[in-house]
Image: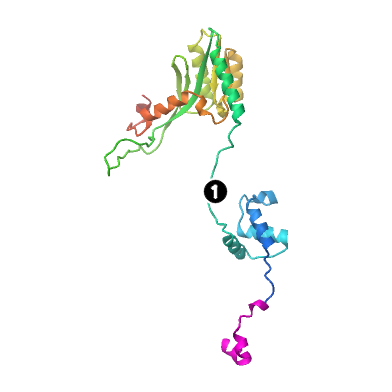
Amino acid sequence: RILMRFDEEGIDGLYDKRHEQSPRKVTDEYVEIMLSLIADSPRQHGWGRSTWTRELLALQLKKETGIDCHPTHVGRLLHDSSVYWNRAKAIGKPPVDKVWKSRVANKIKALRDNLAADEMMLYQDEVDIHLNPKIGPCWMPKGKQFEVETPGQNKKRYIYGGLNPDTGNIIWTVSERKNADGFIEWLKVMSSRYRRYRKIHVVLDNYIIHKTNRVKEMVKNMKRVCLHFLPPYSPELNPIERLWGELHANITRNHQCRDIDELMK
């Protein structure tokens, strides 16, 4: 082909003639719209998917610009724009308002500081106990890594606990399930243990088992128990969390118990 062009046109036949082709149909505006689309979810634009594919982007771009582009070319445009197929990162909910969090913490502290003689306060929480050990650091010689044998099939127990911050006493129960029934059982045991108090203030987190209708009915019938909920994501305001940290550090980390009963003992 090159030789024929040279024979027909001479030197002029060897020059690049691509500049004579029709203008490029993909415009800068097309690329800008494409980049704005990937920042949204397809559902915001009426599609059923939660993530964009090249094919779906091509369809949406044709709808918005009128330019019909092959999905493979859309993929090249994404690559040229430094946009790559990658795994998203999970993040927690936005942090709670610091002023409101501080206000709730101060309110609970003021309540604790002004308890009457016939009132008491407990900090409540649950902790998961797994037969499969928590793997954590320990002292070992350089160049040698200790091995912790796992039992294989995991078994669980759940401890429901309440800490008296003034005396350090713990009221705790054990259950095979982490649900409202286990929490209600703990409330019964705790109420029975502290019969002499007219009012028992229980400070706890917002876990769903603490707010079921059965729990609300139970607390209403008890009359002596009052629940005070901490702000979300505030483990630092619950002293029993430090107790659970010590429990894991002293017992469940790298443990060698062969069955759940031995571990619970």
* Magenta-drawn stretch, dominant element (helix, strand or loop): helix
| On screen, residue 17 above or below 158 | below
Specify the quadrant that holds the C terminus.
top left
Q: Amino acid at mark 1?
A: Ala
What's drawn in magenta, residue-wise?
Answer: 1-20
Nearest the eye: 111 or 73 = 111
Residue 154 locus on image (x, y percent): 41, 36
Residue 1 in view: no
Residue 29 in view: yes
Residue occupying image coordinates x 48% and y 23% = 239
Q: Identify the residue position indicated by label 1 in the image.
A: 88
Residue 46 locus on image (x, y percent): 70, 51
Residue occupying image coordinates x 52% and y 18% = 187
| On screen, residue 91 above or below 196 | below
Residue 253 vs residue 209: left or right?
left
Residue 10 locus on image (x, y percent): 61, 90
